[in-house]
Image (cartoon, rainbow, N blue to C red):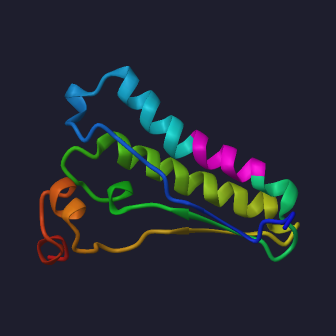
């Protein structure tokens, strides 16, 4: 329809290894998808977005809390949060709202595998 009302950036990936096992290509892949992808998506949407537009950057617990194997992804998510803060200031005068969200744990197979714990354990 020629316009974009909302952008939700949730894409991320990582090797889920301890940092001592991480190689350059793991960092490149994680940051390219999580950071470069977020900024590229935002830049492509902005010409079609007007006042009242919304950009949502999804983060995760690994940006501020230790999760096994999440060292690189946690750093990338923290960088996404920082980028969202900068975009919020830069785009605020245009009436575009940028918000970072960090949902709590949701009991899924993925959460149990990658967090190495259940939701109940994580909330302790």
The spot of residue 6 in percent (x, y) is 70, 69
Q: Magenta segment, which residues?
A: 36-44
Q: Residue at image x 71%, y 53%?
A: 42
Res 65 → quadrant:
bottom left
Q: In the image shown, does 25 or 83 lie closer to the viewer?
A: 25
Q: Is residue 36 left or right of residue 63?
A: right
Spot occupied by residue 122 in the image (x, y as percentages of width and height): 17, 70
Q: Is residue 98 left or right of residue 16?
A: right
Q: What residue is at 22 percent from the left and 54 percent from the top?
A: 67
Toward which corner of the image does residue 90 lie, by quadrant? bottom right
In magenta stretch: residue 1: no
What main secondary structure does the magenta stretch of the protein show?
helix
For residue 40: magenta?
Answer: yes
Foreground residue, 25 or 4? 4
Q: Please identify the quarter of the rendering in which residue 93 is found.
A: bottom right
Q: Is residue 50 left or right of residue 58?
A: right
Question: Image height check: is 12 above or below 88?
Answer: above
């Amino acid at each position: 329809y020629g316009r974009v009302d909302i952008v939700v950036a949730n894409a991320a990936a990582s090797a889920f290894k301890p940092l001592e096992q991480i190689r350059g290509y793991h960092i490149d892949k994680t940051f390219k998808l999580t950071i470069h992808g977020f900024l590229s998506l935002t830049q492509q949407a902005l010409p079609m977005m007007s006042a009242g537009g919304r950009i949502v950057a999804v983060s995760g617990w690994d940006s501020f809390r230790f999760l096994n194997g999440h060292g690189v992804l946690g750093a990338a998510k923290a960088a996404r949060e920082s980028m969202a803060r900068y975009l919020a200031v830069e785009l605020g005068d245009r009436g575009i709202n940028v918000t970072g969200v960090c949902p709590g744990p949701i009991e899924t197979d993925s959460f149990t595998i990658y967090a190495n714990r259940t939701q109940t354990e994580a909330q302790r």
